[in-house]
Image: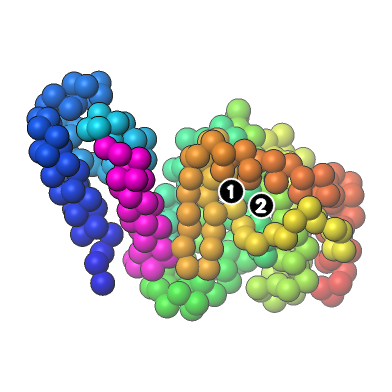
């Protein structure tokens, strides 16, 4: 099986051949695009990740047809999907991924998360997070760096207290009616959610059971400023496409319309805690 690295090298070779066929030097192409002189060389040698925007600009400058340009973009999408597979992300365990997501969220002013089956990582207790990482390591057959991953997740939660951030976390009652951890852990997790409700940075909502959803909810996703990341069983897909961002933002707004917040959310959490007993 060809690795993502090998596919990036092949894509770089293809771009170099297209440039040579067009009779344009790397230096001249960079000047046309207003890029640093070395960027073309770095892209063609897979020393710098080419972006979708880069491919659109290069295709136009090289005079490529619409079909050929779209083939290049499709290959890049396929490479990015392969790179985003959990088998790639988690090959050394969960800690590195927690640190990566933490950096993404530290750089963002607005963070929005819809969690379908679990409590969002930003508000998990350490013990709940421990059960999450153990179960994921079992499912994906990856190294069990559980304590390091829990530590990285707890460190990431400092974002809840960062001035100037807006954090919106929306979850469903599925996390409690079909829990991943024992009842004692879940009750402590509910206490944690109730305690965090008053944070000025945090908007916390819970979709009650039995409400009619605007459409079938298929997966967990998060939005960090202009980037949408969708979590699937085998991979995570990220996009900055304005249409995708608008779609997920609008859908999230419709879900928030159904959510319990404030005192209503607190009452719902307390009922869930009693049910766990």
Looking at the picture, does residue 177 appear above or below residue 150?
A: below
Q: Is residue 68 magenta?
A: yes
Looking at the picture, does residue 86 appear above or below residue 108?
A: below
Identify the magenta region: 64-93
**Which residue is depicted at the point 66% across and 52% down?**
114
Q: Residues within 10 Å of mark 2 (few under 14, many from 20)?
A: many
**Which residue is depicted at the point 51% across and 61% down?**
150
Q: Quadrant of residue 249?
A: top right
Give the overall secondary structure of the magenta segment. Answer: helix
* Number of numbered tags placed on the structure image: 2
**Which residue is depicted at the point 71% across and 34% down?**
200
Indicate the position of residue 3 as horizontal and vertical percent values: 26, 64
Side (left or right) of 184 relative to 79: right
Indicate the position of residue 132 as horizontal and vertical percent values: 57, 68
Q: Residues within 10 Å of mark 1 (few under 14, many from 20)?
A: many
Q: Earlier in the sequence, mark 1 or mark 2?
A: 2
Side (left or right) of 112 relative to 216: left
Residue placed under numbered mark 2 in the picture = 114
Q: Quadrant of residue 121?
A: bottom right
**Which residue is depicted at the point 35% across and 40% down?**
66
Indicate the position of residue 129 as horizontal and vertical percent values: 58, 64
Residue placed under numbered mark 1 in the picture = 222
User: What is the secondary structure assignment of the residue under circle 1?
Assistant: strand
Residue 134 in view: no
- Rounded to the nearest whole Å, what is the CA distance between mark 1 and mark 2? 6 Å
Q: Are the residues at dot 1 and dot 2 in contact (C-beta closer than 8 Å)?
A: yes
């Amino acid at each position: 099986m060809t690795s993502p690295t090998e596919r990036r090298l092949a894509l770089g070779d293809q771009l170099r051949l297209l440039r040579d066929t067009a009779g344009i030097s790397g230096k001249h192409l960079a000047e046309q695009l207003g890029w640093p002189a070395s960027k073309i060389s770095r892209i063609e040698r897979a020393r710098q990740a080419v972006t979708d925007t880069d491919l659109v600009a290069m295709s136009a400058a090289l005079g490529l047809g619409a079909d050929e340009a779209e083939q290049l973009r499709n290959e890049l999408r396929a490479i990015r999907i392969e790179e985003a597979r959990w088998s790639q992300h988690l090959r050394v365990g969960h800690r590195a991924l927690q640190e990566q997501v933490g950096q993404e969220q530290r750089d963002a002013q607005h963070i929005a998360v819809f969690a379908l089956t679990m409590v969002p990582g930003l508000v998990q207790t350490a013990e709940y997070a421990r059960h999450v990482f153990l179960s994921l390591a079992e499912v994906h057959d990856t190294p069990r760096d559980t304590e390091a991953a829990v530590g990285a997740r707890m460190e990431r939660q400092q974002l809840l207290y960062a001035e100037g951030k807006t954090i919106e976390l929306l979850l469903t009652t599925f996390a409690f009616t079909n829990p991943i951890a024992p009842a004692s852990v879940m009750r402590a997790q509910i206490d944690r959610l109730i305690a965090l409700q008053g944070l000025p940075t945090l908007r916390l909502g819970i979709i009650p059971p039995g409400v009619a959803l605007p459409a079938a909810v298929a997966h967990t996703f998060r939005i960090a400023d202009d980037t949408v990341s969708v979590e699937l069983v085998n991979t995570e897909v990220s996009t900055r496409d304005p249409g995708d961002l608008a779609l997920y933002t609008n859908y999230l707004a419709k879900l928030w319309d159904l959510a319990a917040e404030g005192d209503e959310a607190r009452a719902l959490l307390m009922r869930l805690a009693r049910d766990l007993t």
